Image (tube, rainbow, N blue to C red):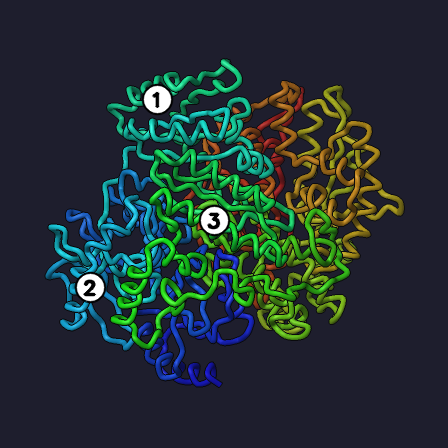
Amino acid sequence: MLREGLRRRLARDFEGELLFDAFSRGRYATDASHYQIMPAGVAVPRSATDVARALDAAREDGLPVTLRGGGTSQCGQTINTGLILDCSKHFNRILELDGAGRRAVVEPGIVLDELNRQLKPHGLWFPVDVSTASRATIGGMVGNNSCGARSLRYGTTRDNVISISALLADGTEFDFGPGTGNRVPEALMQRLLGLGAREAEEIERRFPKVQRRVGGYNIDALVPNGHPVNLAHLLVGSEGTLAVSTAIEIRLSPLPAQQKVQGVCHFPTFRAAMEAAQHLVRLDPTQVELVDRTMLGLARDIPAFVPTLDAFVKGDPAALLFVEFDDPETNAERIAQLHDTMSDLGYGFGRGGAHEGGVVEVWDPGLMADIGELRKSGLNIMMSMKQAGKPVSFVEDAAVPLEHLADYTDRLTEIFRKHGTEGTWYAHASEGCLHVRPVLNLRLEKDVKAMRAIAEEAFDMVRDYKGSHSGEHGDGIVRSEFHEKMFGPRMVRAFEEVKEAFDPDRRLNPNKIVEPPRMDDRSLLRYPEGYRLDDLDTGFDWSAWSGASGGLQGAIEMCNNNGACRKLQGGVMCPSYRVTRNEKDVTRGRANTLRLALSGKLGRDALFSDEMAETMKLCVGCKACQRECPTGVDMAKMKTEVLHQRGQKLGFSLKDRLIAGLPRHARIAAHAGPLFALRERVPAVARLAERITGISARRSLPRFRRDAFHETEIAAAPQGDAGEVVLFADTFSRWMEPEIPRAALRVLARAGYTVHSAVPEGGRPLCCGRTYLAAGMIDRAREEARRTLAALLPHVEAGRPVIGLEPSCLLTLRDEFRALLPGEEAERLAKGALLFEEFVARETAAGRMKLRFDASATKAHVHGHCHQKAAGAMGEMTRALAAIPGLDAEMIQSSCCGMAGAFGYGADTIDVSLAMGEADLLPAVRRAAPEALIIANGTSCRHQIADGTGRRALHIAEVFDRMTSDEEGDRHESEPAAS
């Protein structure tokens, strides 16, 4: 009833979105902490006016209000029982920019990376460079008083905030700033100044003397100490419990020098690194960051990080400290001093034992950026453990003075061991703020009790060292109850007085910082008492993970809500989210929904509901989450599993059956050209077909060719002595673009390879089952996988590489086949299956690819298929193209093309499909010179490019075919696609 009343009030004039259904509320019930609280509703404001309307409506209904940015808080700050305001989608503009004055005014929902992208042309940035910069909002950073890796140089968020415009709980707007910059009720101002004067001595005595102190309220800002009191600094770190920010004035810094150098200091023991930190800081670096052996080992299991690790890790260090300098005039001198310091401390490569170590210099900006991404992913790399226990955040960001760092880490390690666990370490050695998470399984009562005991002992120790129990990530539910232990009862009463002054009715994010619940209250945990997931008969093998449904539970719970899937540029992950900006359409949102559905929190049969279908609908199966999600959440495979479960219970639609059955019906479709042509010419026919099939009338259909590629063509090709290979002709290339396998066959023959075909029993062409997987027909896909595996395995065992052309098909042999037919045979096929460009790159590097190039092109623009990127194959694409003399191949920085197989044909998905194409790819193709080549290996990608720009993109095999000739000098121009 409360929810309905609130929705009615808001619906009158709220301009943003209102989300009150159980599925939407469930997606906002968690953040990156281990807590879960179902809210009453969610509002997505477009403006400060909307925020004020939401406050008014919630106040009338007696509901609290909690603001949310990226939803990446690790202590439970952004979840509560009332109304959640998601400011990240619309409320995210730069309101004012003063480049000369190095200041800006922004709305709280702007993401840090997006802000800095807009500031870069002005030579400025907001320098609080948190690891979650791709999704952290400025409002969230203000709420937590975030710090970032370079706080040694630039300070915390508090140091970079000038003023804040905010609404109090009663809806009145005030300005909080320095001195005369305040526009605050006189009574409130006098009450706060009086508190500061009264408590000045206690503040001096009880507040830790470390930079990384973000616990409690910043009531030290109320003590003048020779400076004007800035009430905005009281709001910083208040976690939305005092006021609701609507505009934040921030201090900007000049962009740092591009010429940096990083010294990667290797240590034989973890303690050695901790003892060295205080000495390295004296060299005036911009940062000193830690990575331990555990994190290095986990990172090596993530394919995206392996090349980076190989480039800078020497030997088997127990810990690394990354020491960065950014002054071009002194970098060489500083790095030399770093070598000297390490030598003075007794470390050198080759010395062995307790003296083994030294410095690896990194000057290359590209490698430095890759190292930065690895280091920023530290938390999520730790969370990539597939076991039931996971590193849990509750003592993770305590800060102690540097001289105590080694002893502190030793003692904390002993506390972990005492309670039967161990921790993983990373982050800010320069500030004495090391992120550490003991591995616990919070589904178990004994581990919840261990969490409580570890917290109490750890915070006692932090207090003994005069450190801060909350050094960066805030208080939330995790640490608020320990304020009295850290600050004493008098300071906690002062915190409560501040809350009373601002929010006497406890409407703003209650029970954070003051009046908190117990941090181990199981009713607030993501895995409460009695938590369990339904046990399903799954289509895929999920045994690599733990839990119900053969491990599907563990795979789903790998999502720790870190929000890396919310990035808006770079990589591929969650391309539909980049269009809609809806929590529903991001990997995190889908994983949370799936977990809640299977644990019974969304009602009976939620897995089979239309709401679940809507949740999964815009997942395009790009597989980018496999590579780019730091915890490896494989949402593409989960979507297929969900479609399979739904289909088993409710059946499959006509559209699903039509698309899934394409490989079987391709021969018939090849003779139905006149019908397809009629649809293309007559709009009324297309609209009728759309109503019947669900395939959009606005999308052209592919042409199935009568001159389809056949294995007899392989048998007729000349044999060579360079080696033997198998050409795997997929359904799409075979029937829609047979010029591609023909081009590949010619190139392989010219290079001297003997090409074999794989013809299964019965003669029907091989199929990877991709179309069945797209529809969720896992059992039918398994049938195709068995046929394909049986036909290809003899070749693999004979040492013949299987060469494929369509990334989505060939890479199915390396990915889904292992979940369809788990076992050694599928593993061998996966290792023996290569994309055409991977084979060319490998053979060229080995000196075996002998081709005669007699044509060249000066420019090519290359779009990578999502599955190529997810498999880490784009490097081979680049290396293969580099073998063509005179070809300048430039990668188009794009996410998914938007076509994504059947997705781009759907009447209900075509708008998102087109918007995805227009985000990066299609504008880049339109900008390309008419004579430049457009290269795209995916059939869907080529279709989207043709529909969106009118240009025909080439497969890399066609490019090699055009640029080479046989010994007689005969070259073959790839024919255009036939109609």
In the rendered image of this protein, does residue 709 appear above or below residue 447? above
612 vs 136, nearest the viewer? 136
385 vs 699, nearest the viewer? 385
Please tell me whether mark 3 sits on a helix, a strand or a loop: helix
Q: Amino acid at mark 3?
A: Glu
Pointer 1: residues within 10 angstroms few (<14), some, or many (20+)? Answer: many
* Residue 792 pos. (x, y %): 80, 38
Residue located 72% across and 38% down the image: 830
In the rendered image of this protein, does residue 758 appear above or below residue 902? above
* Residue 279 pos. (x, y %): 33, 27
Please tell me whether mark 1 sits on a helix, a strand or a loop: helix
For the residues labelled 2 and 1, say whether their Cβ atoms are less than 8 Å apart: no
- Labelled disc at residue 195: 2
For discs 1 and 3, the disc positioned in front in the rendered view: 3
Residue located 71% across and 60% down the image: 776
User: Of callouts 2 and 1, which one flags the residue occurring earlier in the amino acid sequence?
Assistant: 2
Q: Is residue 897 visible?
A: yes
Q: Amino acid at mark 1?
A: Leu
* Residue bearing the label numbered 1: 338
- Please give left or right for residue 237 compared with residue 701 in the image: left
User: Of callouts 2 and 3, which one flags the residue occurring earlier in the amino acid sequence?
Assistant: 2
Residue located 70% across and 65% down the image: 534
Using the numbered discs, state the Cα–Cα distance from disc 1 to disc 3 in whole angstroms: 36 Å
Using the numbered discs, state the Cα–Cα distance from disc 2 to disc 1 in whole angstroms: 47 Å
Q: Quadrant of residue 720?
A: top right
- Labelled disc at residue 457: 3
In the rendered image of this protein, does residue 788 appear above or below residue 502? above
